[in-house]
Image: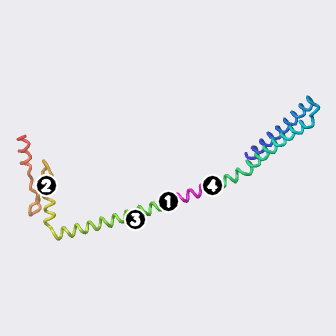
Amino acid sequence: MLALIGLTCAIIGITAFGFCAYWGYVEKCRAPENSTAIFRTFVLIGALSFLLCACLGASVMFGYPQYLVWQQEKEGEAALAKASQDRQIKVQEAEAEREAALSQAEANKTLGESIRSYPEAMEQKWVEAIKETDNQVIYLPTECSIPVTEAGRVASKARQQ
């Protein structure tokens, strides 16, 4: 593919050179008094066009593969940097989770010690929870772990409403 591009540029350069040389020859025939200077000018323009196209073709043929290597190298560096950043993010997330778990364990330990030291605090929380319940049936175990049902109270309350 690159050889085709380079060959195309060379053909364009040769065509430009030939066109300029032909044009110079035509102008030489029209004005014979300045014919040599005009012909040299057109041949010089044609040669410069050919050199420009040849340099363009050569730079495409040899420069493009080098560009592809450079591009792949930069993509690899970007992927490495992204992987490194992702790893650092995961490490920081793991540290944050560890700190949160340690804080939670410490809070649970403090709560357990508080409940053991002050059992009436748990009873107070239970009373507060009962106060917040509205229109619910609560089963309380007796000494034999048999619940006391209040189905009759709920039914009578439904009849009154």
* Quadrant, the N terminus: top right
- Residue 144 in the image: x percent, y percent? 9, 63
> How crowded is the residue under tag 3: few (<14 C-alpha within 10 Å), some, or many (20+)?
few
> How crowded is the residue under tag 4: few (<14 C-alpha within 10 Å), some, or many (20+)?
few
Residue at 63% from the left image edge and 57% from the top image edge? 73
Mark 1 or mark 4, which is nearer the start of the sequence?
4
Q: Which residue is mark 3?
A: 95
Q: Secondary structure at mark 4?
A: helix
In space, the residues marked 2 and 1 are separated at their CA atoms by: 51 Å
Query: Which residues, given as a range, are shown in magenta?
Result: 74-86
- Identify the amino acid type marked 3: Glu
Q: Secondary structure at mark 2?
A: helix
In space, the residues marked 4 and 1 are separated at their CA atoms by: 20 Å
Q: Which residue is mark 2?
A: 130
Q: Secondary structure at mark 1?
A: helix
Q: Does residue 61 appear left or right of residue 119 in this picture?
A: right
Residue at 34% from the left image edge and 63% from the top image edge? 100
Mark 3 or mark 2, which is nearer the start of the sequence?
3
Q: Does residue 61 appear left or right of residue 112 in this picture?
A: right
Residue at 13% from the left image edge and 62% from the top image edge? 123
Q: Is residue 120 one of those drawn in magenta?
A: no
- Identify the amino acid type marked 1: Gln
Nearer-the-camera pick, 45 or 8: 45
- Identify the amino acid type marked 4: Gln
Q: Which residue is mark 1?
A: 85
Q: Which residue is mark 4?
A: 72
Which quarter of the picture shows residue 21?
A: top right
